[in-house]
Image: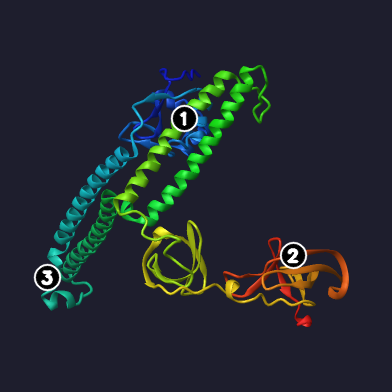
Amino acid sequence: MDTRRNGDFMQFIDNRETLKLELHFDRAEYDELTAEQKTKIKSSYLWSNYGKCWVSRTKYPHHYFAAQVAQDLGAGEAEKQGELLTMSERLENQAERAESRAERYEEHAANAEKRAEGLQKEFNHLRQDIAWLTQPIIAGHSGSRAFARSRDRVMARYDRGMEEYKKSGYYIDRAETARQTAEQAKLKNAGYLERRIKEQNAIIKKIQQYIVNDENALYKVQNGETVKHFSGDLFTSEELEKAIEKQLERYEFEADKLTFFEDALQDIGGMKYGKENIKPGYIINIGGGIGQVVKANPTSLDVKTSCGLVIKYLYGEIREVIKAEEVKPKNETEPQPYKVGEIVTKNRPADDSIYKAYQIVGATDKTVKMRQIALEKGIPQPEKFTGEAITRKPVISKFNGKWTLYEDDWQLHRWQQAI
């Protein structure tokens, strides 16, 4: 089958304005595709009645698999159409579409309510006559049967009216969701903006590293060295130049988003809270709940919620400070409780049996020094050392507020027989 890129068979388009890939087929040629090919298309594309084409499920720059499906059909590189819009322009278009959707849903809701009123009008009138509701049906009486059929039709229309009222409620909910999108309420939420800024900085850092790696590879290739793909194939100068061009384009795209979110944060007054004015012990309203600050980190804070869990939040998610009273963490005010001679163990999760034990041979207010000791039938043997001493710092557990000692990432348990 002829699968020429952008020929009579298929046109493969990179729509820069919508950030989507598009596959345009002639209907007859599409019908000739195998079932497997059609399944692959449907896995990465959705049919658009508006555009009369297959549109990628993903948006730029996450088109790898969608592009691979097109290339497997022989499409090659996508034909670029339009220009990349700025973040502000994209959100403006999104708001306009959302407003239009809200108006359509509100119209659908109003029409459904009118239909419901019309379907239930007759019943609402007839039910005022209690005899109409309670009249018994006499078996074998033709007039009684006719009345029964008539009443059943009225009741059926009433039931359809209830379904229309449900549709009206559904459309009202959809309209409200669309209206919230149109109003862009998230852009007034400092927590949301802080998360987006953090994500964008991480993305940009990765892109910068990709560019540096590709430029170093290009320099090597241009100077006669060989640089290989993971597959073992050799990179070419043209391939690396194209990769750098793509990464630079994406860098501009992501940097524009970062600037947009930073400007939006400044528009609402910037960051109100941070490490300098939030301290451990403060009672705060965060995410609609009340919690106590356990630890204030440079970019986030650990908060103990009303249910006792410690959850990490960003400073932008703080709605208000309810009580500004600093409380020093236990590990800053109390000496650690482990004593020389005490034994701690590593236990198997399945049956809590001991398979490694340590005895503390030295201790300060902040740290302990411990050495591994022998086990006999799963019982620790004091003073029978089998390893070198290691030093660890006990910490307060975020989950239960108790002192905890770790060997690497594995929690050590106090051996009850030694206490």
Location of the C terminus (image quadrant): bottom right
The answer to whether residue 400 is visible is: no
> Which mark sits nearer the N-terminus, 2 or 3?
3
Quarter-wise, where is residue 49 in the image? top left
Circle 1: residue type: Leu
Circle 2: residue type: Thr
Disc 2 to disc 1, C-alpha distance: 48 Å
Residue 39: percent from left, percent from top: 50, 36
> Which mark sits nearer the N-terminus, 3 or 1?
3
Residue 140: percent from left, percent from top: 22, 72
**Residue position marked by numbered label 3 in the rendering:** 126
* Res 391 label: 2
**Residue position marked by numbered label 1 in the rendering:** 248
Disc 2 to disc 3, C-alpha distance: 87 Å
Badge 1, how many Cα within 10 Å: few under 14, some, many 20+?
some
> Which mark sits nearer the N-terminus, 2 or 1?
1
Q: Would residue 95 be found to the left or right of residue 376 on screen? A: left
Disc 3 to disc 1, C-alpha distance: 73 Å
